[in-house]
Amino acid sequence: MTAQKASPTISVIVDTYNQARFITQAIDSILEQTFDRKDLEIIIVDDGSDDGTDEIIRGRYKNAVTYIYQPNSGQASALNTGFQLAHGEYIALLDADDYWRQDKLKIVLDAFARFKLDVVAHNLKIVGSNQTEKLYFP
């Protein structure tokens, strides 16, 4: 299954393995970005999930993402598959059990443009099962 492509600015690669519980929140957080959707491609690489992840993606996102299912080979293999398929000028990674703020891509692209950078790292917030939050900086 392949979504339509047109020279995206950013390719977002989401690697997943048995993350049906979280995949919807991850993909929705990409689709809800303030960044212009036409400049974005979303590549989901499913590394052998057997928990219904594929049914969720094919059913809910079939026209919004490029979905690749591969036999379980590990996260590095899934990411490499995503890199091979990416057409964007920039690549962003999102694990299937994570999600982004709505302005994440805009902030990152602004940093690339403003400071003429090749790589951007940023802080993250970890939300625990008891809903506590911890802020980490690179």
Image: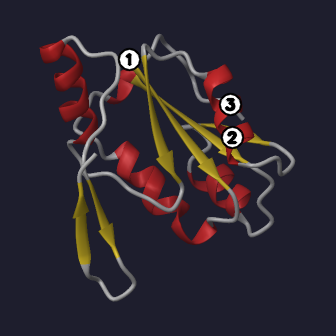
Q: How crowded is mark 2: few (under 14 residues within 10 Å), some or many (20 or more)?
A: few
Q: Nearer the viewer, residue 131 or 68?
A: 131
Q: Which mark is residue 9?
A: 1
Q: Residue at x 34, y 16 (%)?
A: 118
Q: Which of 54 and 116 is in front in this view?
A: 116
The answer for how far apart the CA atoms under marks 2 and 3 are is 6 Å
Name the mark nearer the viewer: 1 or 2.
Answer: 2
Question: From the image, which quarter does the C terminus lie in?
Answer: top left
* Residue located beneath label 3 in the image: 80
Q: Which residue is drawn at 19% across and 14% down?
A: 113
Q: Which residue is drawn at 64% across and 37% down?
A: 79
* Residue located beneath label 2 in the image: 76
Secondary-structure class at tag 3: helix
Residue type at mark 3 is Asn
Q: In this view, does 64 lie above or below 71?
A: above
Q: Position of residue 2 (x, y in %)?
A: 67, 30
Q: Residues within 10 Å of mark 1 (few under 14, many from 20)?
A: some
